Amino acid sequence: MRVKVKAYADLQRYNPQKGEEFIVEIKDGSNIKNLMESLGLPDYRVMLILKNERMAKEEDLLADGDRVSFLPVIGGG
Amino acid sequence: MAFGYNGKILRVDLTTGEISVEEPEEKLYRRYLGGGTLSLYYLLRELKPKSNPLGPDNILIFCTSVVSGLSAPGFNKYTVAAKSPLTGGFGESEAGGWWGPELKSAGFDAIIIKGKASRPVYLWVHDGQAEIRDASHLWGKVTGDVQKSIREHLGDNRIRIAQIGPAGENLVRYACILNDLKHVNGRAGLGAVMGSKKLRAIAVRGKKNMEAFNKEAAQEIVKNVRESYTEDSAGLGRLGTARVAPILSAGGILPTKNFITGFFEKAEDIGGKRMEETILTGRGTCHGCFIRCKREVKAERPYEIDPIYGGPEYETIASIGSLLEIGSLEAIAKGNELCGKYGIDTISFGTTLAFAMECYEKGILTSKDTDGVDLRFGNYEAMLEFIERVARREGFGDLLAQGAEIAAKKIGKGAEKFALHIKGQPLPMHEPRGKKSLALAYALSPTGADHLENPHDPFFEKEGGLKDIHPLGILDPLPSLDLSIQKVRMFVYLQQYYNWLNSVGMCIFAAKPFGPFTITKLVDYTRAVTGWDTSLWEAVKVGERFANMARVFNLREGLSEKDDRLPERLHQPLEGGVLEGEKIDPKEFAQAREMYYGMMGWDPQTGVPSKYKLEELDIGWIIPQLVHTQA
């Protein structure tokens, strides 16, 4: 299946295709944690995960066409 | 011989014109280090309790630290401190740039300014000397003109100038102090204190190189820090602090429409990426720093924006952008330039204007009150117009110039609930309902609502992020929305860590968890520079010393636990965004505050430090000041 990923600002370094938004091919039945592993994106760098514009958890299963956003940790300043 | 610092403090009495130099003993430096802590040492000793913050008795202090100003990333900050005209309590604000390091090269670690000049003056500090000079011809001019004029007159383009603008001259309660026109001591209204003394600027220049005790060790640490820094391809250096606006909006915690909601539909339009694509012309930095988080912007249409004032930081983008529902980056950048020209804190101005806009939309204010201006949210022309009117204190701008708290009292009619301030300090641009230690930070910061009291909760939700603060003894991750006793403990430790950073003039963006300087390396660096056999224990004890000194200062000035509160809005649910419905539960907050007092060694009900705690911190000499709390 294919999911559309948005890795905001600081997290772009985990996008193999460069840029903020990109498509990832991932095997059926994967969850968000699997997606993060495939990108090499460590959990402690993520402040919030959104799936189809709603808050999501790493255990949430993905479906073809889902949009997943990763928001980097922001801590003041 | 002192290493890392000069051992000299400049004293200036503007009433008498007397200038002298104090040479404190080494132990004083070691006990208080610099920044807010060393400033509090002098304020508590020399400022008469209950002095008028805008009267000649107030004392204005510019203070570097024992280790700042050598060539290390982040170690370039200096503190300005005084009694705050916004809060009536301890006021301090830090700024980076080159001014602090230049002051040390000029031979001084701090400047203590008393009295009031009979006419406008500026201070010229150079190579171990200081002169008070006439500034009558500079009074009323915008900051860019004043900097140019002083540099030309003194014939040196490398002179560093910290100054107020017309807003400070006119005692706008949230006037700021700027150096190099773009590094700002923004908060607490210290520009008004400087204006009340008729001191327009402090120009500094020096040729002395500060020496480290162990130069090779200090250089090796800086080299290691540099090598450990792996910059994100689209992180702070490339996109600046401005990059966080769209992130926070997507996360439901971008202060929008006077904190009614945390989601702003135009957030992408005002973020760092959009800035890069449109008005960004360069990236700037501070003394000794490779992170380059500062912005340079330029535009000709729809507004001509002068690049000398730098580009807007995130705090400005939110405070005169999303908070007012303004989605034009050009208008925000113009507002940033105008606040720089006139010397206005963008945060306090934005929060005060947001208050007025909400009053206007709720019918508490009408166009008759606002000089005929349609003060609806989103009106960016009104935002730009009122910066100048606030600075000149014209019409409705005169009311806004007093800050949200006083303006609300004068307006009445229930306006108070829309004035978002703590202790009179308008709220900065982070949302406590989405990261709950911030509720404690805002309510308990001695300077009123402050977003730099501690690194925020999202860093510490996962084991991986916690590694940075293991040296403090914080070992368990906690959710951002948690406000349990474990969160209070985490906050107490992190607050003392940040109090230490403020005392040594360290930028939060260069230190962990943001930047490359680890907690251990910060200690190692202090050892290498000063030659002292010091430790993290001694360092965080200075942080705790600061917290207690500031607490006692506020208590003697009449503040109490009643002022350690949140605006009612933060106890209401967030509207819209992914965190819709989230709020700070009043009971949970009250319990957390009690736990904080208790952990600090303060009375759990009144927040008064115990005498034994003050003795333990080696500041028993301030115990007699607690008697003023009864007054």
Image (tube, coloured by chain):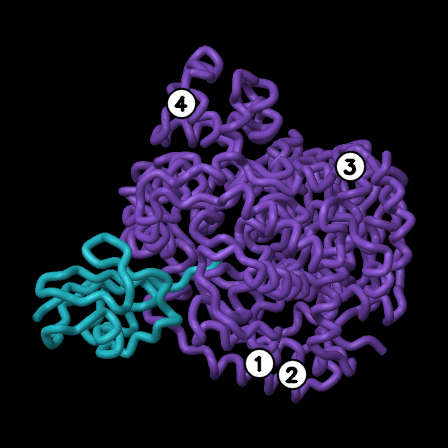
Chain colours: A cyan, B purple
Can residue A47 be seen from the camera position used here? yes
Secondary structure beneath label 1: helix
Disc 4 versus disc 2: nearer the observer:
4
Residue at mark 4 shares a chain with residue at mark 1? yes
Disc 1 residue type (three-letter) = Val
Subunit under mark 3: B
Subunit under mark 4: B
Is residue B217 shown left or right of residue B19? left
Seen from the viewer's position, the closer of residues B256 and B48 is B256
Circles 1 and 2 in contact, beta carbons < 8 Å:
yes
- From the image, tell me which residue sits under label 4: B375
Q: Residues under labels 2 and 3: Cα distance?
A: 44 Å
Disc 2 residue type (three-letter) = Ala
> Who comes first in sequence, dot 3 or dot 4?
4
- From the image, tell me which residue sits under label 2: B218
Subunit under mark 1: B
- From the image, tell me which residue sits under label 1: B222
Subunit under mark 2: B
Q: Residues under labels 3 and 1: Cα distance?
A: 44 Å
Residue B287 x %, y %: 58, 66
